[in-house]
């Protein structure tokens, strides 16, 4: 009977092995980010598309030899606060506007802009006119975002500083998936 007991135990173990392996293989494996997964993310494409919409609205409204200033995109519920998302949206829109032949002033290299540690270049309304005048800027690009449980809604405007007229505006939304969610966390 001892031989039968050992044989039965081995049979059970051998029969159970494929089941254990099958259970392991059905567990989803989290892939490391690679070029294919990152390049398919719509974050940059959405921001570039927003800038392209602004460029088309601005066609003929701006002088090519006068600069624009990009303010940091801020949280609509706390206008003196932003996140990595707000700073990166600002950077990408500024990049795309520059690629579209507009002269963008790089504010991080300037001293007379309101900087809040860890926030980026935030422009207070009362200072926009002064900053624009100092840099001979014909327009300032401003923006805000609002979060919901599953979306981030953005509003970007190009404003003429001496009149406060809106020259161009665009609204769009980003899905609040992993990458976007991580950029919204306060650091």
Image (cartoon, rainbow, N blue to C red):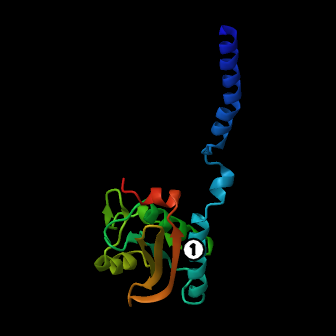
Q: Is any part of residue 138 visible from this angle?
A: no
* Image vertical order of residue 57 relative to residue 4, above or below: below
* Image vertical order of residue 60 relative to residue 88, above or below: below
Q: Residue furthest front?
A: 1
Give the residue drawn at x 42%, y 70%. 148
Give the residue drawn at x 59%, y 65%. 44
Q: Residue furthest left?
A: 126
Instruction: Classify residue 27 by image quadrant.
Output: top right
In the image shown, does 166 or 2 lie closer to the viewer?
2
Report crowding for label 1: few under 14, some 14 to 19, many 20 or more residues within 10 A (C-alpha). Answer: many
Residue 122, position in %: x, y?
Answer: 35, 68
Residue 2, position in %: x, y?
Answer: 65, 8
Residue 61, position in %: x, y?
Answer: 55, 89
Instruction: Classify residue 50 by image quadrant.
Output: bottom right
| Left or right, residue 93 beside residue 114 | right
| Left or right, residue 136 beside residue 8 | left
Count the numbered circles shown: 1
| Left or right, residue 65 beside residue 141 | right
| Quadrant of the rendering where the N terminus is positioned | top right
Residue identifier under label 1: 97
In the image shown, does 137 or 117 lie closer to the viewer?
117
SS type, badge 1: helix
| Left or right, residue 48 beside residue 169 | right
Residue 186, position in %: x, y?
Answer: 36, 56
In the image shown, does 63 or 78 lie closer to the viewer?
78
Q: Is any part of residue 92 visible from this angle?
A: yes
In the image shown, does 182 or 31 lie closer to the viewer?
31
* Image vertical order of residue 29 relative to residue 177, above or below: above
Give the residue drawn at x 52%, y 57%. 179
Q: Residue furthest top?
A: 2
């Amino acid at each position: 009977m001892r031989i039968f007991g050992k044989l039965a135990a081995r049979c059970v173990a051998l029969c159970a092995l494929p089941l254990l392996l099958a259970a392991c293989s059905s567990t989803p494996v989290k892939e490391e980010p690679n070029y294919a997964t990152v390049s398919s993310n719509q974050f940059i494409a959405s921001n570039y598309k927003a800038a392209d919409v602004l460029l088309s609205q601005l066609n003929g409204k701006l002088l090519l030899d006068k600069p624009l200033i990009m303010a940091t995109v801020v949280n609509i519920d706390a206008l003196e606060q932003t996140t990595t998302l707000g700073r990166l949206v600002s950077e990408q829109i500024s990049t795309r506007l520059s690629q579209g032949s507009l002269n963008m002033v790089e504010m991080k290299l300037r001293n007379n802009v309101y900087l809040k540690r860890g926030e980026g270049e935030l422009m207070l309304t009362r200072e926009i006119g002064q900053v624009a005048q100092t840099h001979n800027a014909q327009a300032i690009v401003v923006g805000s975002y609002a979060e919901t449980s599953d979306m981030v809604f953005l509003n970007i405007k190009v404003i003429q500083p001496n009149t406060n007229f809106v020259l161009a505006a665009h609204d769009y939304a980003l899905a609040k998936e992993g990458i976007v969610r991580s950029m919204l966390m306060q650091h």
